[in-house]
Image: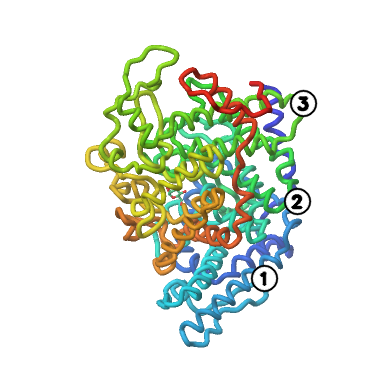
Amino acid sequence: MMMESLEVAAHVLSGTISSHSCSTLHSNTSPFISPWSIDGRIRRKRCPLHARALSNSNVNQNLSRVRGILHSHKRSRHVMLQCQRNESSSKITSEDGNRSWVKDAVSKASQILSDVNGQTQTVIGFDEGAIKTGDDKSFLAGTNDHASPKRRGSSFEDEAWCLLQESMVYYCGSPVGTIAANDPSDSNVLNYDQVFIRDFIPSGIAFLLKGEYDIVRNFILHTLQLQSWEKTMDCHSPGQGLMPASFKVRTVPLDGDDFATEEVLDPDFGEAAIGRVAPVDSGLWWIILLRAYGKCSGDLSVQERIDVQTGIKMIMKLCLADGFDMFPTLLVTDGSCMIDRRMGIHGHPLEIQALFYSALLGAREMLAPEDGSADLSRALNNRLIALSFHIREYYWVDMKKINEIYRYKTEEYSYDAVNKFNIYPDQVSPWLVEWMPDKGGYFIGNLQPAHMDFRFFSLGNLWSIVSSLATTHQSHAILDLVEAKWSDLVADMPFKICYPALEGQEWRIITGSDPKNTPWSYHNGGSWPTLLWQLTVACIKMNRPEIAARAVEVAEKRIAADKWPEYYDTKQGRFIGKQARLYQTWSIAGFLVAKLLLNKPDAARSLWNEEDADIINALNIMVDSNPRRKQGRKVLKKTYIV
Ligand code: GLC
């Protein structure tokens, strides 16, 4: 108890405390103007499209929203983190580097588009840190010259870079994340004007691949400061170690000074989110990004910091805490990941398990051995082994397995029951019998007592390949299935979030008749371009990049012309989603990461986990000691002591 309090204190206090608060002092109160805020303003003005997005009526709306929130903020004692300077945030890359790639991207885009339009476009330039343009986004996105694939390819990428740059959010003058969507035509922003942890991952990876490390480092350190602050909902606080779903930078009056303002980071742990869903995936993604940051930048000093080490441990402790659960998989409520609404994925959804596995591996790799860390290290190892055995063994389906389930006996009371979870064969529904290809297989969406959710969830399957939760054989089989089911999973826009959609009575009961999640829309069988990046990492890892390249080609045909929607609707992904945001940052970043990786496949290495020899060995021992399994599996020389 004592130890934990100390750790929490260390977490909050260490490293990042500095005397610099980010107050913007108005010049009539003081001749001193914080260089941070000046810098911030200059940076914000850099990309004029961004400035326009915030201009006019939007600004007024924003201001009144901030005031309203401030009011409730005081009442409910929401945690606002005072702006602190990260003491060495500029160590790794220089702002100049940042400028030069933006400059290059923008001037290339300008050049190409002027050629395309046959006009002299002199409006885009780069001047003293500010990009000037005389046109709006439609200038970039709406060009109707899609004739030359070569030209089209590069101009789309340049446009995507520019849009990604515009989506950057600054805190005290430093970039700390990217806004979820930057759609100037949308007046109902909801929380899409926030930085979502999960949405930032592809942005962060795009920046890492481009050598822009500052924003990722800042994101990691600032979100860490938000972790575990006491947030309450109806008198109940979420577990310590929880990372927020999203945060917003707000400018608020400085306490006790009528003329000064300060910027604050205001996190949402789900207590304001639609449906009050718990962001279980945030902490897992945070660990994954932290590892990628170290691998790509070579800067291990971030993961070695005491506060970062404590942050990793807190996430792990929260995930490893004992509960009532019988399975090694994480037990969560509905909507606790990318699918953040009721979709019948409560229990042990695959996506969370794949991210959990990756985060366990990342934590084990990054945690420094120290006095008293043996217990945690043992717990991590044991969980990794149990989790991979459970998923590989019980979540896997292919033709052979479906046939086995179809012939299952039920009501077996014994330690070595074949049908351990008492699955009734009737659950093998007709769509599955039709759909399962002869060659290929996948992990089911969820497993509970007497319940197998046979829907195919893309992110969980792709991330199982990336993290090596799937065996090599299973990984190839998942990609075989993607190829065999191309017209269902890719069709006119990659990539289906899940297959098939819930329809009729099932939709009514499982989603609660959710009008946003109607069949083949949004989370219920919609198509999400952001998934391109996970598909690309998975394909490169399995040495089958051509699959991802084909999918990127499909997306390229329309994604920019459609203004980078959040998702697409219909079975084939033919329509822009009913309520899809445009200029959705993770659609832009997902596309960019896919492109970058296909150009430089070696870079994908920093994003995946190789299969771990200790885990394979332990699994082999478990499998071989099971009397039902056939013999003949070789145990690796190295033995594993559990
Ligand atoms: C939607 C998505 C969620 C995403 C958020 C912000 O709610 O379901 O995964 O994080 O939008 O883009």
| Mark 2: C-beta under 8 Å from nearest atom of ligand 1 | no
Q: What element does badge 2 sit on?
A: loop
| Mark 3: C-beta under 8 Å from nearest atom of ligand 1 | no
Residue, far front: 632
- The structure residue drawn at horizontal position 52% and vertical position 28%, both measured from the top left corner, is 389
| Residue picked out by circle 2 | 87
Whichever of callouts 1 and 2 sits on the residue coming sooner in the sequence is 2
Whichever of callouts 3 and 1 sits on the residue coming sooner in the sequence is 1
| Residue picked out by circle 1 | 100
Q: Position of residue 357 (x, y in %)?
A: 56, 36
Q: What element does badge 1 sit on?
A: helix
Camera-nearest label, 2 or 3: 3
Q: Amino acid at mark 1?
A: Ser
Left or right placement of residue 504 versus residue 298 in this view: left
Label 3 Cα crowd, 10 Å radius (few <14 / some 14-19 / many 20+): few
| Residue picked out by circle 3 | 371
State the CA–CA distance, disc 3 to disc 1.
46 Å
Q: Work out whether residue 98 or residue 589 is closer to the camera in this orientation and state it.
A: 589
Q: Work out whether residue 578 or residue 433 is closer to the camera in this orientation and state it.
A: 433
Q: Amino acid at mark 2?
A: Glu
Q: What element does badge 3 sit on?
A: loop
The quarter of the picture where the C terminus appears is top right
Whichever of callouts 2 and 3 sits on the residue coming sooner in the sequence is 2
The quarter of the picture where the N terminus appears is top right
Q: Position of residue 68 (x, y in %)?
A: 47, 50
Camera-nearest label, 1 or 2: 1
- The structure residue drawn at horizontal position 75% and vertical position 46%, both measured from the top left corner, is 301
Verify CB contact (< 8 Å) between mark 3 and mark 1. Answer: no
Q: Position of residue 388 (x, y in %)?
A: 53, 31
